[in-house]
Image (cartoon, rainbow, N blue to C red):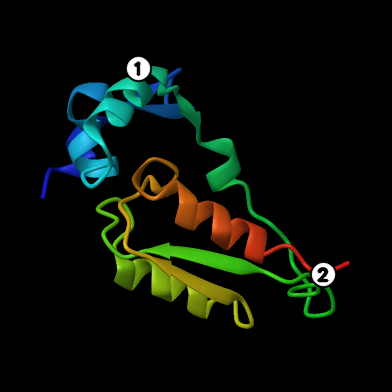
């Protein structure tokens, strides 16, 4: 398995990170069609830390009020399935859809991802 941490570099005085596209395909999209990966990698942008580092506040009354679906990707090298399932355990009541996918199901299995997302839409 490629070294994920070796692909990540800080940007903007540590306010975000950027992924080196040269090795990203083997980590983020190892099962995806190579031509789609080649087209996607040059589009990688720096990701700010703010959304991941800003504390959120949830209440028992409001948490889980809306239906949730968690799409897990069994071959994800970025967030291993065991870690995904720990996150799922922290969000009880979410419907789980399992895809045999890498970290990029929109490239790896777009039809199955579309079906999972459409299936997550509550009936009117």
Residue 74 in the image: above or below residue 34 = below
Question: Which residue bears the numbered disc 2?
Answer: 123
Crowding at dot 2, Cα within 10 Å, few <14 / some 14-19 / many 20+, comes out as few
Where does residue 14 sit, x and y in percent of width and height?
42, 26
- Residue 62 lies left or right of residue 4; in this view the side is right
Closer to the N terminus: mark 1 or mark 2?
1
Pick out the residue farthest to the left: 1
Q: Is residue 20 visible?
A: no
- Residue 28 lies left or right of residue 46; in this view the side is left
Residue 49 in the image: above or below residue 62 = above
Element under disc 1: helix
Pick out the residue farthest to the front: 111
Q: Nearer the viewer, residue 2 or 53?
A: 2
Quadrant into which the C terminus falls: bottom right
Q: Which residue is drawn at 59% across and 42% down?
A: 51
Any mark on residue 42, and which?
Answer: 1
Crowding at dot 1, Cα within 10 Å, few <14 / some 14-19 / many 20+, comes out as few
Numbered disc in front, either 1 or 2: 2
- Residue 116 lies left or right of residue 33; in this view the side is right
Residue 61 in the image: above or below residue 10 = below
Q: Nearer the viewer, residue 107 or 24?
A: 107
Q: Nearer the viewer, residue 40 or 35?
A: 35
Element under disc 2: loop
Where does residue 84 sit, x and y in percent of width and height?
40, 67
- Can you tell which quarter of the image residue 74 is in? bottom left
Where does residue 82 sit, x and y in percent of width and height?
31, 72
Any mark on residue 113, and which?
Answer: none
Q: Residue at x 54, y 46 (%)?
A: 52
- Residue 45 lies left or right of residue 36; in this view the side is right
């Amino acid at each position: 398995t490629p070294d994920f941490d070796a692909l990540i570099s800080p940007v903007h005085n540590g306010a975000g990170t950027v992924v080196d596209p040269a090795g990203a395909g083997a980590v983020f999209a190892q099962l995806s069609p190579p031509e789609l990966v080649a087209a996607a990698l040059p589009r990688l942008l720096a990701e700010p830390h703010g959304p991941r580092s800003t504390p959120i506040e949830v209440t028992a009354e409001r948490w889980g009020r809306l239906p949730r679906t968690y799409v897990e990707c069994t071959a994800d090298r970025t967030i291993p399935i065991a870690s995904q399932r720990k996150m799922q355990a922290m969000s009880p009541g979410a419907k789980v859809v399992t895809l045999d996918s890498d970290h990029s199901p929109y490239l790896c299995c777009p039809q199955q991802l579309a079906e999972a997302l459409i299936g997550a839409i509550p009936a009117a």
